[in-house]
Amino acid sequence: MGILDRYARKPREEIRDKTVTTKLTGSEYERFQEYCAARGLAVSEAVRLLILAEMDEAPTVQAVAGRVRQTGGTRWTMAPYLNPDGVTFRCPVCGEDIHRSNGARHARTHGYPGTRELLEGGKRDDE
């Protein structure tokens, strides 16, 4: 898990009006763009988060829990819900830390069909 997996978007408190520019090779840019897209982040947003992380000002996932940003795809990801260790998430029903590979099994114990429904408060099987 990389740095970007641990952070989420911060609400806009002030206007962002300054630009940072850098040069990358085509292959570096493509790799970074795919890396960001897999995590639901725009390239510019990811660069901003990396800069803030370097300065220790980036928000944690818990600070903006539940927000998933889609950029061009429809695939759901649990990355925004993961704890800083990158492999566990906090169950919103019982408060336990659950390993990501056991998410669906744990969701079923609370009557949800899957991890997504559990984390996003979706419809339960018994409803």
Image (cartoon, rainbow, N blue to C red):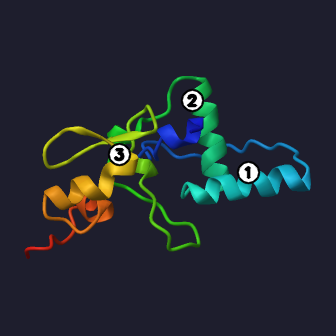
Q: Nearer the viewer, mark 1 or mark 2?
A: 1
Q: Is 84 above or below relative to 122? A: above
Mark 3: give few (<14), some (14-19) or many (20+) Cα within 10 Å.
Answer: some
**Residue placed most toward the observer, 28 or 47:** 28
Q: CA distance from mark 3 to mark 2?
A: 16 Å
**Residue 1 showing in the rendered view:** yes
Label 1 residue SS: helix
How many residues crowd around disc 1 within 10 Å: few (fewer than 14), some, or many (20 or more)? some
Do we see residue 17 in this rendering? no
Q: Position of residue 22 (x, y in %)?
A: 83, 42
Going by the numbered disc 1, the residue's amino acid type is Phe
The image quadrant where one finds the N terminus is top right
Which of label 1 and label 3 is nearer to you? Answer: 1
> What is the three-letter code of the residue carrying label 3?
Val
Question: Identity of the amino acid at label 2?
Answer: Ala
| Residue 19 as seen in the image, left or right of residue 107 | right
Given contact means CB atoms under 8 Å apart, are the residues at marks 1 and 2 in contact? Answer: no
Q: CA distance from mark 1 to mark 2?
A: 17 Å
Residue beneath disc 3: 64
Tell me: 14 left or right of 65: right
Name the residue: 46% across, 38% down. Answer: 86
**Relative image position of residue 38 (x, y in whole percent):** 59, 58
In this picture, residue 96 sits left or right of residue 70: left
Residue in the picture at 19% in, 65% down: 112
Residue 64 appears left or right of 58? left
- Which of the 4 image quadrants contains residue 109? bottom left
Q: Earlier in the sequence, mark 3 or mark 2?
A: 2
Rounded to the nearest angstrom, the CA distance separating label 1 from label 3 is 24 Å
Query: Is 96 above or below relative to 31?
Result: above
Give the structural element (helix, strand or loop) at label 2: helix
Query: Mark 2 — residue?
Result: 53
Residue designated by label 1: 32
